[in-house]
Amino acid sequence: MGEKVFMQGNQAMAESAIRAGCKLYFGYPITPSSEVPEYYAKAMRERPEEHITFIQAETEVSAFNMVAGAAATGHRAMTATSGPGFSLGQEAMSYMAAGDIPGVIVEVMRPGPGDADILAAQGDYFQAVKGGGHGDYNNLVLAPYSVQELCDLMQESFELAEKYHNPVILLSDATLAKMREAVELPGYVDEPAPADKYNALRGCGKDKEPHKVVTCGDGPVQWEQFNLKLQEKFKRIKDNEVRYETYNMDDADIILVAYGSMARVCESAMKMAREEGLKVGMIRPISLWPFPEKAFEGITGKKFLVCELSAGQMVEDVKLAVENKRDVSFFGKLGGTTPSPKVILEQIKKI
């Protein structure tokens, strides 16, 4: 690990990506993610020895496809966007998943639908977790809840993208993006040469098999086999990449379920409830896809309170994971305001 600094979430995340070997950034500025391209633009000017390249695309459509093109040649590449920009990138991510192309997409959620506002929200869960684009595919989705996790999961996102040759979404929100916290920056990663990577495009050579990107079929038989192979990849991800944390589960009567910045609020509410003698625990999903169904296995006779900055999206996955969906209650907040721990405590008391 590197030095300890006091840093904004977006900026810390960008520095972590550079140290992970991502020297290519393509993006279009959109609040509240704009500090990420700003950081890359500044680093490109001030650190020429690191060969950092920042390109401001005409639109998010262009930026996402630039990431795909660079990653197809074996380079680590990323973009960061928010809300409407993320919507514009869905087609490219479908193509990347089909073509075994890795890449990292940062989505800093803000309220919707439409242009809405530039505050914190979690209403893009469905779009990130359920695919968003066309066809049967999945993206890995990781949800940090601190600036430190933004840094750590950024490094892990590139590793997972190249391990499974698939896009990875780092799902942040406006609160985490603008928050400043003490963070220990990771060290620099020694990357293999792009030409040595599995996914790098190449023609016929003496010592290596040619590699090309395939995103269209030659009849139903061939395309079914192609899709079945993709589903095998997604199954490996589901079997091996589930991530979550649990708190005070041993004696809990009520279990809070939250991710991202909302998990910070719920963690404080859980502590307040414990101080009042209420037996409250918590499950914090870190991988939103694959969803941590394991965290809910064998839990019976307890009540769940799912808290989101949305009208209710992750709550559907919780209901699928628990034994009795009637045990699941929901509290949501819309418009970009984040409830205080006291508000969550009142919801706990109602249950």
Image (tube, helix red, strand yellow):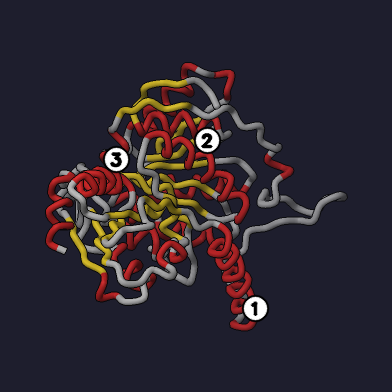
- Residue underneath mark 2: 24
Mark 2 crowd level (few <14, some 14–19, many ≥20, 10 Å Cα):
many
Asked if one can make out residue 126 in the rendered structure from this viewpoint, the answer is yes
- Residue at 46% x, 56% y is 92
Above or below, 27 relative to 41: below
For this orientation, the residue located farthest to the right is 206
- Residue underneath mark 3: 30
Residue 156 on image: x %, y %: 53, 43
Calculate the distance from the C-alpha at mark 1 to the C-alpha at mark 2: 34 Å
Q: Which of 211 and 271 is in front in this view?
A: 271
Mark 1 crowd level (few <14, some 14–19, many ≥20, 10 Å Cα):
few
Q: Which of marks 1 and 2 is nearer the N terminus?
A: 2
For the N terminus, the image quarter is top right
User: Does dot 3 land on a helix, a strand or a loop?
Assistant: loop
The answer to whether marks 3 and 1 mark residues whose Cβ atoms lie closer than 8 Å is: no
Above or below, 34 relative to 244: above
Q: Quadrant of residue 118?
A: top left
For the C terminus, the image quarter is bottom left
Residue 49 on image: x %, y %: 59, 18
Q: Which of marks 3 and 2 is nearer the N terminus?
A: 2
The answer to whether marks 3 and 2 mark residues whose Cβ atoms lie closer than 8 Å is: no
Asked if one can make out residue 338 in the rendered structure from this viewpoint, the answer is no
Residue 208 is tagged as none
At label 2, the amino acid type is Leu
- Residue underneath mark 1: 222
- Residue at 38% x, 63% y is 132
282 sits to left or right of 134: left
- Residue at 28% x, 46% y is 267
At label 1, the amino acid type is Gln
